[in-house]
Each structure stands twice: as structure tokens, then as C-alpha cells.
Amino acid sequence: MSYLLIGNLLMTLFVFLFFNFKEQNMTYIHLNISTMIVVLTNYPLLGHANFISKTFVLFIGSIDVIHLYLRYYHSDNYNIYIRYKWFHLLLALLFNISIPFIIMHSDKSVYLSSAYLSVSFFIIGLIMYQLSEVNRTVKWFQFEYLNIYKYINHPKRIGEYLFAISFMLLVLFLPKGYLYIIPTIFYIIYLKSSSLFKNQ
């Protein structure tokens, strides 16, 4: 386990330093790439397959794919640059250190209802996140035209909040679940204070 934690730390630092040198203005993407690598290496090594661990891997994989798309194909209209990059690195380290513990203890949740509920929040988050791709009127049941997008400000950031909430619900009743929730609350505060994913 200690080797796995050291590997996660080194991978997180390597990815951060790589993007720190590569990008003139550093973006958020280092967190998503390091998290994806850590999850894809830790999950098969730890071998805990159950509802929470599988859902966790699915959450991380889905979020990372849409963030990669945003960063490299659709970033013109959004704030993707991070402030306080060392604090962003700290969040990445805390999250990637927690990943093996979440997977290992995923079968010890004392209450699964919140984990099931987390899927609903995640799906709503995906809808909100992708709603920002709609820049034209949406045909609604073939009767009238409604521009849904204009009624919602910063849907990508709202989607990101919902992703964070779904994660907290997923791990809420794991042993020492508060240790996973506290960094997530800091992440939500960071999103708000740094205007990350805000429409330009």
C-alpha cells in the first residue's frame, strides 16, 4: 500500500510539473489527467469490485473525458486557467492519495442509499455541463422553440458543483468518509473563488 501511495504522489507531481512547464498560463487539466491515471492503475491493482468502486471509476472516467474535450476542443468561451496553482496541486495530491482508500473501503459503506442517490446528481451534472454546448434554440416536443441556455448562467460550473456533490454522496458513509468530503468542499470553494469554468 505504501508503494501505491508513493506512486500516486509521484505521478501527481510529475503531471503537474509537466503542464507547469508546458503551458504558459496553467490550466486545470493536470488534475484530471493525473486522477485518470491513478484510478486506472489503482483499481485493477486493488481488485475491489462493487457498486461504489465501479461507480467511482465511472464518475472519474466520464468527468475526465468531458474535461479533456473542454480543454482541447471547446475552451474559447470559458475560464480554464487556474489561480493559486500550488493550492490546485494540493487538491490534486489530496484527492489522488484518497483514491486507493476509497476503492479499498468501498465495500464497507454502512448505508448505500446515498451512493445510489449520487448517480442521479451525477446525471443531472452531466446534463447541466453539456447544456453549455447549446448555443441555439432547442426544439421542444415539436411544438415551440425554447432557448433553455439563456435561463442558466455558467452551466459548466453548475455541472462541476453537481459532480462534487455526487462524489460526496458516494463516499458519505464510507469509513472516515469526512476525510474525502473535506477536500471536495475546498474544491467547491476554489471553483467559486477562482471563477473556474465561468462563461467568458
Image (cartoon, rainbow, N blue to C red):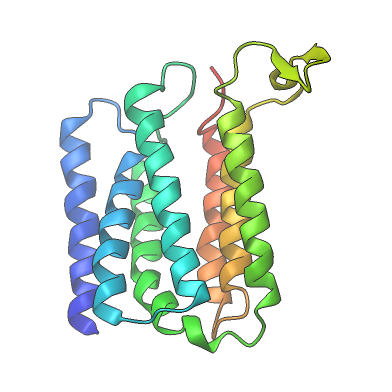
Q: Examine the image and state in which quarter residue 181 appears.
A: bottom right
93 relative to 21, above or below: below
Name the residue rendered at 29%, 26% in the picture: 25
Residue reaching furthest to the right: 143
Q: Position of residue 200 (x, y in %)?
A: 53, 17
| Residue 87 image point, x, y percent | 40, 50
Frontmost residue, 118 versus 34: 118
Q: Residue at x 33, y 56 (%)?
A: 35
Residue at the image position 72 percent from the left and 26 percent from the top: 152
- What residue is at 65 percent from the left and 79 percent from the top? 112
Provide residue 86's location: percent of width, then percent of height. Answer: 34, 48
Q: Quadrant of residue 47?
A: bottom left
104, 197: nearer the viewer: 104
The N terminus, quarter of image: bottom left
Q: Is residue 129 above or below residue 144?
A: below
Q: Give the camera-side residue of 162 and 58.
A: 58
Q: Nearer the viewer, residue 80 or 47?
A: 47
Q: Please tell me in which quadrant of the rendered image residue 96 appears.
A: bottom left
In the rendered image, the vertical position of residue 160 relative to residue 92, given as above or below: above
